[in-house]
Image: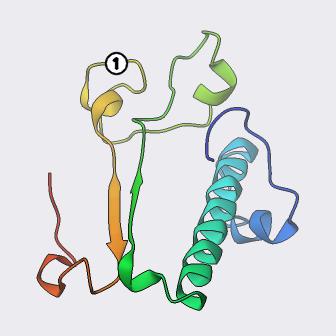
């Protein structure tokens, strides 16, 4: 999960995937956490496909809300690495940066028709 505590995954390839981020070590660590999550989702999908379950599966990945930007509060460590730009504010706020979240739906063709693929909903 890409959530507190902010800790780099033990596999060095995830930090290597994020070497291009030079703004801060904390942002590189968040990137490495996202890289590790992406790798795990990829392994999960591969397992479903190997077991011939993918065509009967819908996978929905959902964010809980924006990143923590409560500088100085109990989440100051997380806050110094998060960004919801260009949205205003973040987690715990009623502004867009706190309530807007991304979501991805994917799955087998038996359940998710081609016409629905690539659609954007806001």
Residue shown at 14% from the left, 51% from the top: 122
Looking at the image, the residue that sits furthest to the left is 115
Instruction: Residue 106 in the image: state x and y as whole percent.
Output: 35, 72
Q: Is residue 64 above or below residue 12?
A: above
Q: Is residue 87 left or right of residue 33?
A: left
Looking at the image, the residue that sits furthest to the top is 73
Instruction: Residue 65 in the image: state x and y as whole percent.
Output: 39, 35
Q: Quadrant of residue 81?
A: top right
Residue position for label 1: 93
Neighbour class for label 1 at 10 Å: few (<14), some, many (≥20)? some
Instruction: Residue 93 in the image: state x and y as whole percent.
Output: 34, 18
Q: Quadrant of residue 47?
A: bottom right
Residue shown at 55% from the left, 80% from the top: 48
**Foreground residue, 101 or 96?**
101
Q: Is residue 18 left or right of residue 121?
A: right
- Is label 1 in a helix, a strand or a loop? loop
Q: Is residue 83 left or right of residue 106?
A: right
Instruction: Residue 41 in the image: state x and y as whole percent.
Output: 58, 68
Coloration mode: rainbow
Image mark count: 1
Residue shown at 48% from the left, 34% from the top: 67
Residue shown at 18% from the left, 86% from the top: 114
Q: Is residue 5 above or below residue 52?
A: above
Q: Is residue 99 above or below residue 85?
A: above
């Amino acid at each position: 999960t890409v959530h507190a505590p902010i800790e780099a995954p033990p596999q060095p390839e995830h930090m290597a995937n994020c070497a291009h981020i030079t703004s801060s070590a904390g942002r590189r660590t968040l990137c490495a956490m996202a890289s590790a999550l992406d790798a795990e989702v990829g392994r999960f999908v591969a397992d479903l496909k190997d077991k011939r379950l993918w065509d009967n599966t819908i996978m929905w990945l959902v964010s809980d809300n924006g990143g923590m930007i409560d500088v100085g509060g109990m989440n100051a460590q997380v806050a110094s690495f998060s960004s919801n730009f260009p949205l205003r504010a973040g987690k715990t706020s009623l502004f867009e940066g706190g309530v807007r979240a991304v979501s991805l739906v994917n799955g087998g063709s038996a359940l998710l028709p081609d016409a629905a693929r690539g659609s954007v909903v806001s």
